[in-house]
Amino acid sequence: MEEIVISVAERTLVAGTPLLLGTVGEIICERSGILNLGVEGVMAVGAVSAFIVTHHTGNPWLGLCVAIAAGMLISLVHAFTSVSLQSNQVVSGLALTMLGLGIAGLLGKPYVGKPLAVKINALPVPLLADIPLVGPVLFNQSPFFYLAIALAIGMWFILEYTLIGIRIRSAGENPQATETQGVNIALIRYWSVIVGGGFSAMAGAHLSISYSKSWIEGMTAGRGWIVIALTIFALWNPLRAIIGAFLFGGIFVLQYLLQPLGISPNFLAMLPYIATLLVLLVGSLRDRRRLNAPAMLAEPYRRGER
């Protein structure tokens, strides 16, 4: 029984890791006032970039770095259209998703069915990994897990207690007043979108060079859309995102636990998305101010406007 509990808990954390990375990135982006619905596409670009580089070099860490760079680069498209062109952010984000999925499918087609010779494996923490029950679950995970937790805590601290964090939040709450303090709103929003794209690309890289060691088209499997819902669930707070991400990770694992009971596989595959719809439904029923949503989220801002 103990082995089953440990196995389920481990798989839950593994499944929740890319969701946490993507959610923290989306929180950064939305806190600055930019809605990014292109997470799914950026994750796909990160996954295929990491896989291709790792496949040819045998170095998954280099693959991760290239994936982050690729995610940040393609996120520039959304930043440019949303900030510089003042375009509709919903349309721009959806276009980014389609662009990213298209690029990933095109670049990854020759690599379907070609497994990696090496991937980023679990990294046991000395001494801590030997603690009964807790050790194997928390301290025998992929480096991506430790990185995701550290980044979530770090971004929470930055957003709440540093000058750059205050500027990011101010850009999403009251850009007019922030601009009078000499802050370049466009620059803040550009960098927030770009950094958020890097986080989403890391999430994609986790899927192709750590969670598995193969590439298949559509391997992001809608996780980018779940990230959007988790951002609302977390109330735009990276610490709450930790809870939400691993809760949804548990829902992914639940699919496999219920399969032996004879429940329809199609229904089980729907579970994460049913949960996503429920989160969005509950969020829509609550007052936006109580949700802590950035006041100017998805609202274009032109410099000098009053």
Image (cartoon, rainbow, N blue to C red):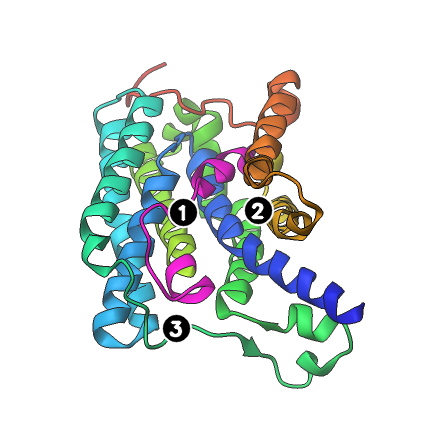
In-front residue for pair 94/82: 94
Report the residue marked by disc 3.
119
| Mark 2, secondary structure of its residue | helix
Q: Is residue 269 above or below residue 146?
A: above
Q: CA distance from mark 3 to mark 2?
A: 28 Å
Circle 1 crowding by C-alpha within 10 Å: few under 14, some 14–19, many from 20: many
Residues rendered magenta in the picture? 207-232
Q: Position of residue 295 (x, y in %)?
A: 51, 22
Q: Position of residue 226 (x, y in %)?
A: 51, 38
| Residue type indicated by callout 2 | Pro
Is disc 3 placed on a helix, strand or loop?
A: loop
Q: Give the alpha-carbon distance from disc 1 to disc 3, as whole Å.
A: 18 Å
- Foreground label between 3 and 2: 3
Q: Quadrant of residue 234?
A: top right
Residue 216 included in the magenta stretch of the image? yes
Amino acid at dot 1: Thr
Q: Which residue is mark 1?
A: 220
Which is more N-terminal, label 2 or label 1?
1
Which one is in front, 123 or 301? Answer: 123
Q: Residue at x 59, y 45 (%)?
A: 241
Residue bearing mark 2: 238
Left or right: 304 in relation to 175: left
Which of the two labelled residues, at mark 1 and mark 3, occupies the earlier sequence position? 3
**Farthest-out residue, top:** 306
